[in-house]
Image (tube, helix red, strand yellow):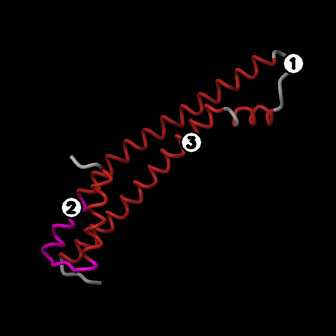
Amino acid sequence: MKSFEDFCADLEAKIQATYQEGVTMEEAEKLAAEFLNAQLQVSKELKRADLDARARKSGVKAIRAAIYLEILQKNGEGKKPTEAAMAATIDSDKIVIGEQQSLDEAEVNRAELERYYDVFLNSHIYFRGIAKGSFN
């Protein structure tokens, strides 16, 4: 079974081939359906990516909160550091940095999938128009 990246690369190649070689109305009808199916596939991937990003965001919040409490406990009563000092300590923690990077990557992945969805939507509309004989 081909990977999602290969699936998208194949569809990108089909878009490129249509503007380089042209497309018949019959081929356009098939491509319109293929890009509609591609939207369904991307939608499934978007669901996974969205859940991953949300879970990572919750994880980052939990880690930040745990470190915040740890800082408070280390300093004891009456010796609470400033919020700026606590934020700097939390932000420089290696675990927080690593988890934030993972969250950032998950959000970038989700955004890329949203762009693919939009491209495949426009491709479906484009090929459907050709299949119907609309060349506007």
Mark 2 vs 1, N-terminal side: 2
Q: Quadrant of the C terminus?
A: bottom left
The residue at which mark 3 appears reads as 101
Identify the residue shown where x is 75% and y is 36%: 88
Disc 2 secondary structure class: helix
Please rate how many residues cluster around mark 3, counting C-alpha atoms within 10 Å: few if below 14, some from 14 to 19, many from 20. some
The residue at which mark 1 appears reads as 78
Where are the magenta residues, as a range?
Answer: 19-36
Residue 65 x, y percent position in the rendering: 65, 27
Identify the residue shown where x is 67% and y is 25%: 67
Mark 3 vs 2, N-terminal side: 2
Q: Quadrant of residue 69?
A: top right
How far apart marks 3 and 2 lie (CA) works out to: 35 Å
Q: Which mark is residue 34?
A: 2
Vertical arrangement, residue 34 with respect to residue 107, above or below: below
How far apart marks 2 and 1 lie (CA) works out to: 66 Å
Main SS, magenta residues: helix
Residue 127 x, y percent position in the rendering: 24, 72
**Residue 98 magenta:** no
